[in-house]
Image: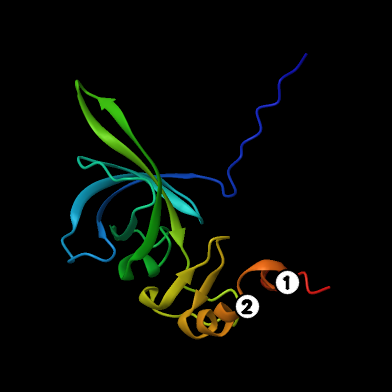
Amino acid sequence: MAINNISKRAFARDCCEAHIKYSLFNQKEEYIDAKMYNTSDGGLYFESEEHLPTGSDIRIKINCNTPDIHRDVARDGYRGEVMWCRKVYRNGGSVYGVGVRFIVNVCDKCGEKVPYSEIHRTDNYFFLCSFCMKDIMPWIGGKVSECVERYLNGNVL
């Protein structure tokens, strides 16, 4: 019997080593140095001396002059969510390997690009600007909530 090894990743990974800096999103901008080892359209993997709890909301700046890495957006920085953090052993020592999913700054409802500070994630991973979030909040819950989710997914029937 042949075993298929199907990847569960939504985006292909690109191996790319680059120095990055990250900080907790709602904290003072005290950036910590780390090293990125791969990236994709949906996130990245880096290693750090510091442990980051799963679910942490972080800012990431890629210190790289290579235009291929996420173009100019990399210099402006990203916002991401720590999906996992594990101890990794390297060269007789250890660091923490961190998997991050990018948080987008485009509203799923109106399509506007807004500052990261004005984007809100719903429980079902829709990203809404402050205006659309305020507009939708009264409808969240119960059967109406299901209709709103179908609408945001593009299933309007």
* Mark-to-mark CA distance, 1 and 2: 9 Å
Q: Contact, CB < 8 Å: mark 1 with mark 2?
A: yes
For the residue marked with disc 1, what is the amino acid?
Answer: Cys
- Front one among 144 and 41: 144
Residue 147 numbered mark, or none: 1
Q: Residue furthest right?
A: 157
Q: In the rendering, at what x and y percent does residue 85 appear?
A: 35, 39
Q: In the rendering, at what x and y percent does residue 37 appear?
A: 36, 42
Q: Quadrant of the N terminus?
A: top right
- Residue 134 position (above or below residue 1): below
Q: Quadrant of the C terminus?
A: bottom right
Left or right, residue 67 beside residue 6: left
At a point 38% along the width and 73% down the height, the residue shown is: 116
- Front one among 153 and 134: 134
Which residue is tagged 2? 139
Q: What colouring does the structure picture have?
A: rainbow
> Which of the 4 image quarters holds residue 118?
bottom left
Per the image, label 1 sits on a secondary structure element best described as helix
Per the image, label 2 sits on a secondary structure element best described as helix
